[in-house]
Image (cartoon, rainbow, N blue to C red):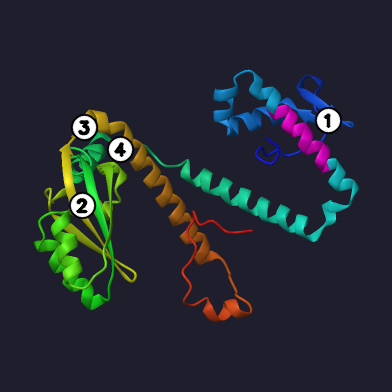
Amino acid sequence: MFGVLVAGCREDGAVPESQVAARVNGEDVSVHQVQAVLARQPRLLATAGEASAQRVLEALIDQEVASQAAREQGLASDPLVIQSKHATERELLARAHHDRIAAKAGGSTSDEIDRYYDSRPGLFAQRRLYVLQETAIEASDAQIKEAKAIALRSRGADELVRALKEAGFRPASRQFVQAAEDLPMVLLEPLASAEPGQSRLFPQAGGARIFTIIYAHAAPVDRRTAAPAITEFLLAERKRQLVADEMKRLRQAAQVSYGGTFARSAASAPLAGPSASVPR
C-alpha cells in the first residue's frame, strides 16, 4: 500500500480530537485524510469493505513516519524535493482550474442525442460485431497505391495475402474480434459500409494496415439504450471543448518568452493541449 496511496495534505492548526484517527510522534493523521484517500480509491472500499479504512490509516501512518524521518534528515530542503513539490502544486492547481471550467458544461437535449444517434449508424442502428483480419505491410507511397488496388479487388483474407505476396509484399496477419464501439472511428466508418470478404487499407508511417472483414454479426442498439452513453459522451466533449477554449484564451493572453534552444524551436512546436501530460 505504501507508495500506492497518496496522503492528504497536512492541515495547518490543530485537528479536533474527534477527527484524529491516529497520532504519530505528536503529529495528527485525521479522519478527513483517511476519507480523502478512500474517495480516490473506490476499488479499495469495494474489495476490502470495512477493513479498507484501517488499511488506509496504516498506510498514512507509514507515510507520516517516513515523512518525519525525511524532515529530520533535512530532505525538505533538498533541491529535487523542492522541485517535485512545486511541480505537484502546479499540476494540482492546473487540474483544479480545468475541473472548475469543465463543471460549467451543460447537459444534452433530446434533439442533440437524436442527431448524434442518427449520425453514427455504424455505432447504433447498424452496429455490428466484427471478426477482422489485420494485415500489415511495409511499403513506400507508390507501393501503397498498388496495395490499395489489391485490397479493393481481393475477395477474402486468403486471396488478399496471396496477391500481396505475388506483388512482392511481406504481409503479417492476425485475426481478432471487435465490437463497433471498440474500433477507432477512422476504421469504423469505412468498415461499416463493407461486407464480409471485403478489405479496406489504411496508410501509416512506413507502410499500411489492411483490414478484411471475415464475419460481421448485426447487433443494433436502439436509441433508448444508447441514450445514456451518448449523453455521457456529449457531456465529456463539452467539458473538453470548454477547457480547450479556456486554455487557448489563457495562452493568447499570457506573455511567454522562450530561452536557450527552446527559443529556436518554439515557432514550429505545437502547443500542448489541456490534457497533455507533462513529465516531471
The kind of residue tagged 3 is Arg
Disc assigned to residue 230 = 4
Left or right: 49, with 225 as reference point: right
Report the residue that reaches farthest toward the bottom: 264
Q: Which mark is residue 189?
A: 2
Question: Tag 3, which secondary structure?
Answer: helix
In this picture, residue 1 sits left or right of residue 222 = right
Circle 1: residue type = Ala
Q: Do residues under tags 1 and 4 come within 8 Å of each other at their CB atoms?
A: no
Residue at 19% x, 61% y is 161
Of badges 4 and 2, nearer the viewer stands 2
Residue at the (20%, 67%) spot, across then down: 165
Task: Name the residue tied to disc 3.
Answer: 223
Lower position in the chain sequence, tag 2 or tag 3: 2
Lower sequence index among marks 1 and 4: 1
Helix, strand, or loop for circle 4? helix
